[in-house]
Amino acid sequence: QVRLAESGGGLVEPGGSLRLSCEASGNIAGHYFMGWYRQDPGKRRELVATITTFGTTNYANSVKGRFTISKDNAKSTIYLRMNSLKPEDTALYYCNYDPRTWNPGAPVTWGQGTQVTVSA
């Protein structure tokens, strides 16, 4: 079983920055995707950014050039640096751990979510 601990959300003005962190612990696989998804009430959860243990990244078009995902494999931790934040970035941000590409039968883990609010 893998557990995810998220931190770093909060209230920020438009144009501001935040950094989210997510640390994985427990029975962590050798290779996996970790990433961030977000969800507004009444909307579907959407991908924000993912990164593999090899460092391959993927971003939603809406955040490209503003958000940067990075990792520290030794700490099993990922970070999401969010710059030039907009009100439409307001959402509950969830950390995700997904090893299925390398182990199809393995479970996916979600964090509890951390709120990001962008408002003046």
Image (cartoon, rainbow, N blue to C red):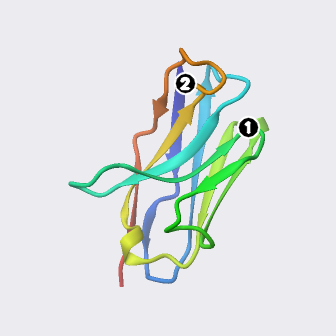
115 vs 99: above or below: below
Mark 2 and 1 residues: CB-CB less than 8 Å, in contact? no
**Mark 2 belongs to which amino acid?**
Val
Q: Is residue 79 left or right of residue 48?
A: right
Q: Nearer the viewer, mark 2 or mark 1?
A: 1
Spot occupied by residue 19 in the image (x, y as percentages of width and height): 58, 62
SS for dot 1? loop
Q: Is residue 41 left or right of residue 65?
A: left
120 vs 24: above or below: below
SS for dot 2? strand
- Residue to which mark 2 is pinned: 2
Q: Quadrant of the C terminus?
A: bottom left
Q: Who is closer to the viewer here, 109 or 17?
A: 109
- The residue shown at (58%, 74%) is 83
Q: Which mark is residue 41?
A: none
Q: How would you rate the neighbour count of disc 2 (Cα within 10 Å): few for under 14, some for 14-19, many for 20 or more? A: some
Residue located farthest toward the top when viewing the structure as drawn: 105
- The residue shown at (52%, 60%) is 60
